[in-house]
Image (cartoon, helix red, strand yellow):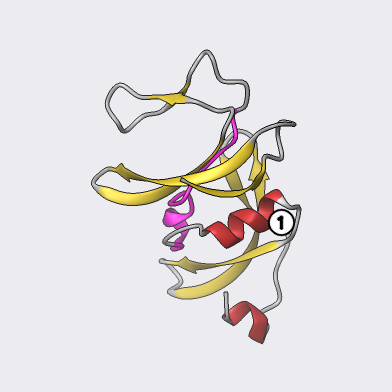
Amino acid sequence: MSIIGKCPYCKDGVVSYEQKLVRGKNTKVYTCSNASWRSEDGEMFELSPTATCSFRIWGNSLLRWGKRGIGPIEVRKLINGEDVIVQLYSFTAKKEYYKYIALDKEYGISVVWDIDVEETQENRNV
């Protein structure tokens, strides 16, 4: 387990990540030290009754928009309140585009669809 930083949802937790095998593919899962999860089949995870925090981000949560994974640097920026721009891909329009992502208590992270990101040289290095 590798520690990323302090949990943004609780006072005394730290966010770390570990590799998990989900649907036959490796992905990172970022969780708070106060969050504990249970699974009966290794695919669906529920918050355990003893957990005091629900922070978690699945590394593959933006896969449906063409982003292969969320990395530790991006998660560190998110939990520190910094802006994070990700490169996404439209499979129907066959083009890349950029959007901000934000922490979301229900889903871990979400794409901020309402704000357009100007394409700059800095974005291309995302």
Q: Residue at x 23, y 46 (%)?
A: 24
- Residues 77 and 67: in front is 77
- Amino acid type at image mark 1: Asp
In this rendering, the count of numbered labels is: 1
In reply to whether residue 82 is colored magenta, the answer given is no
| Residues packed near mark 1 inside 10 Å, few (<14), some (14 to 19) or many (20 plus) | few
Q: Is residue 91 above or below residue 121?
A: above
Image location of residue 27, percent across then percent down: 38, 50
Residue at the far left in the pictured view:
24
The residues colored magenta run 54-67
Image location of residue 92, percent across then percent down: 42, 66
Q: Secondary structure at mark 1?
A: loop
Q: Residue at label 1?
A: 114
Q: Is residue 95 above or below residue 8?
A: below
Q: Report which quarter residue 40 is drawn in.
A: top left
In reply to whether residue 61 is colored magenta, the answer given is yes
Q: Quadrant of the C terminus?
A: bottom right
Is residue 113 in view from this perspective?
Answer: no
- Residues 40 and 15: in front is 15
Is residue 99 in view from this perspective?
Answer: yes
Q: Is residue 36 left or right of residue 100?
A: left
Q: Is residue 110 left or right of residue 39?
A: right
Image location of residue 74, percent across then percent down: 60, 60
Q: Residue at x 71, y 67 (%)?
A: 116
